[in-house]
Image (cartoon, helix red, strand yellow):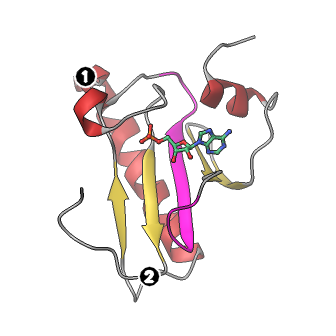
């Protein structure tokens, strides 16, 4: 069994509120939502962070962003707008080292981030 918490969600050994999935990507609601809509979009294959992606991952990256778009649309954010965030590494505030995009919306999001 994997020690990566998001791999375990992919395996189904940890429960999650799954919003969408396809062959390569999985979307599930964040356990500690920071906005009315807060969904995480991950690759099913383990990749630790954006920094670990390479040229061979172009198609996967496109698929991940299209999944973000699909989640945002299905959650009713297409007109109001939303934010896609990929915290990366220590200074980026990444706490789970399985690549994920946060899809946040349903309220006005301040800028710049803290
Ligand atoms: P980050 O700090 O950018 O690495 O984001 C990790 C996110 O994963 C945080 O927003 C957590 O709330 C979320 N998270 C951690 N464990 C779970 C879980 N079991 N199910 C859903 N979301 C989780």
Q: Secondary structure at mark 1?
A: loop
At 55% across and 37% down in the image, what residue appears?
Answer: 24
User: Pointers 2 and 1 in contact (CB under 8 A)?
Assistant: no
Corner quadrant of residue 87? top left
In space, the residues marked 2 and 1 are separated at their CA atoms by: 34 Å
Residue 81: give x, y in percent of width and height.
36, 80
Q: Is residue 93 left or right of residue 103?
A: left
Q: Is residue 92 left or right of residue 83?
A: left
Q: Is the distance from the Cβ of mark 1 to the nearest ligand 1 atom less than 8 Å?
A: no
Which numbered disc, 2 or 1, marks the residue closer to the eye? 2
Q: Extreme bottom residue here?
A: 79
Q: Residue 54 — which label?
A: 1
Q: Earlier in the sequence, mark 2 or mark 1?
A: 1
Q: Is residue 37 above or below residue 53?
A: below
Which residues, given as a range, are shown in magenta?
33-46
Q: Is residue 17 above or below residue 87?
A: below
């Amino acid at each position: 069994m994997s020690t990566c918490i998001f791999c375990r969600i992919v395996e189904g050994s940890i429960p999650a509120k799954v919003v969408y999935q396809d062959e390569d990507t999985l979307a599930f609601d964040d356990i500690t939502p920071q906005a009315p809509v807060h969904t995480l979009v991950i690759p099913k294959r383990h990749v630790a962070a954006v920094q670990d992606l390479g040229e061979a991952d172009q198609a996967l990256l496109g698929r991940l962003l299209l999944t973000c778009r699909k989640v945002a649309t299905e959650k009713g954010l297409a007109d109001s707008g939303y934010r896609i965030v990929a915290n990366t590494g220590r200074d980026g505030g990444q706490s789970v080292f399985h690549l994920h995009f946060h899809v946040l919306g349903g309220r006005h999001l301040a800028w710049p981030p803290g």
